[in-house]
Image: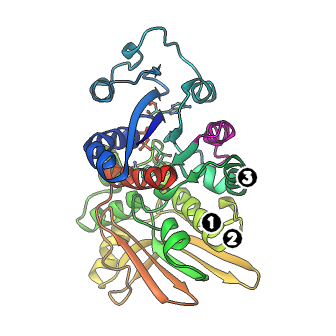
Amino acid sequence: MKKMKIALLGFGNVGRALAQLLIAKREVLREQYQIEWSIVGIATRRHGSVLKPSGIDLEAALSLATADKEISTLAPNNSDIDGVTFVRMSGADVLFENTPVNYQTGQPAIDHITTALELGMHAITANKGPVVHAFDRLAELAQAKGARFLYESTVMDGAPIFSLWQEVLPVAKLHSFRGVLNSTTNLILTLMETEKSFDEALAHTQAIGIAETDPSGDIMGWDSAVKVAALVTVLMGIPLPPDIIKREGIEHISLEDVIKAREEGRRWKLICQAWRDGKGVKASVGPEQIDPNDSLYNVMGTSSAVTFVSDVLGDLTITETNPGPHTTAYGLLADFIRAVR
Ligand SMILES: NC(=O)c1ccc[n+]([C@@H]2O[C@H](COP(=O)([O-])OP(=O)(O)OC[C@H]3O[C@@H](n4cnc5c(N)ncnc54)[C@H](OP(=O)(O)O)[C@@H]3O)[C@@H](O)[C@H]2O)c1
């Protein structure tokens, strides 16, 4: 039996969904995978932090966090500590880094993950920042320390994207991809087709917990650009900073634009794409009107899809219907099993 001590850095929508999934899958992890886990630390920004080597009562932590209460009451002598200190003091075997994404620098998540890997912990994240701003460095550090740096949930939540290319499609070379990768903007555009205003539609995405902490990143195409950068960097092996991707968001799409397109049998989508160009790559994010023949036409609501074109399989499309924190949590759990085995 492998007994894994886990630290949760970030206990918001995703951190809490992961906690629920760990509890739900505790028996199957033990019986089928010979993995036992205990939570030795949870850190947040406004709800305090808790470190307890003997194990934190995760159900109690969930109740407190859901009720918007301090979790630091779960163990004595917990003061406010920064993320890096939390990782150092945790004594964990595995760090889950689920703090908000910083599109510009990837910090402080990069420091959190670097600290974990230096200590020989596996580091697993749904945070795109470290993948696009420090992928090579973190992957090399993980290898040097005999640990894993895994990030399946950074693009299309729990759908297998990175593991598909890394584990299931040997020797395949990715030529290009095209997709709808941002749930918030796709849901907003879908709701606008039912004549909801942009603001009403945005408020709905925030209420159901799919918009980023700062929704402007979704609306202005940053989230999509960062996902394109992550896919290009990892799957094409070409480091691509998100700020050089040609990017346009949906902030200028009006209700009138959406209704007019609907009347003409078309629909607006925020299209993400990248293709090899000689030894380099070209990439863009921007709204397009597409017609019913387009494979992305029926990707509605929070759903996402991506079509990969490779040298061995032609077009391969992955579609994810109605994702949310629970599917993101599944990607993290799958990474956990991958790392521990
Ligand atoms: N939501 C999704 O379905 C989804 C899907 C794919 C990827 N992601 C990624 O997953 C990550 C987490 O998303 P989320 O929706 O769970 O965000 P969230 O609900 O805003 O939760 C973020 C958590 O991080 C904590 N936090 C913020 N800054 C911190 C810091 N400096 N040190 C320690 N803790 C800190 C927050 O503390 P407080 O609780 O005190 O505010 C909160 O617990 C993001 O990077 C996001 O891009 C999310």
**How many circles with numbers are drawn on the protein?**
3
> Would you say the beta carbon of the disc 2 residue lies within 8 angstroms of ligand 1?
no
Q: Quadrant of the N terminus?
A: top left
Q: Is residue 219 left or right of residue 64?
A: right
Residue that numbered label 2 is attached to: 237
* Residues at circles 2 and 3 in contact by the CB criterion of under 8 Å: no
Q: Residue at x 58, y 83 (%)?
A: 172
Q: Residue at x 45, y 20 (%)?
A: 52
Residue that numbered label 1 is attached to: 234
* Residues at circles 2 and 1 in contact by the CB criterion of under 8 Å: yes
Spatial CA distance of label 2 from label 1 is 5 Å
Q: Residue at x 47, y 34 (%)?
A: 5
Q: Which residues are magenta?
A: 103-121
Spatial CA distance of label 2 from label 3 is 13 Å
> Would you say the beta carbon of the disc 1 residue lies within 8 angstroms of ligand 1?
no
Residue type pointed to by label 2: Gly
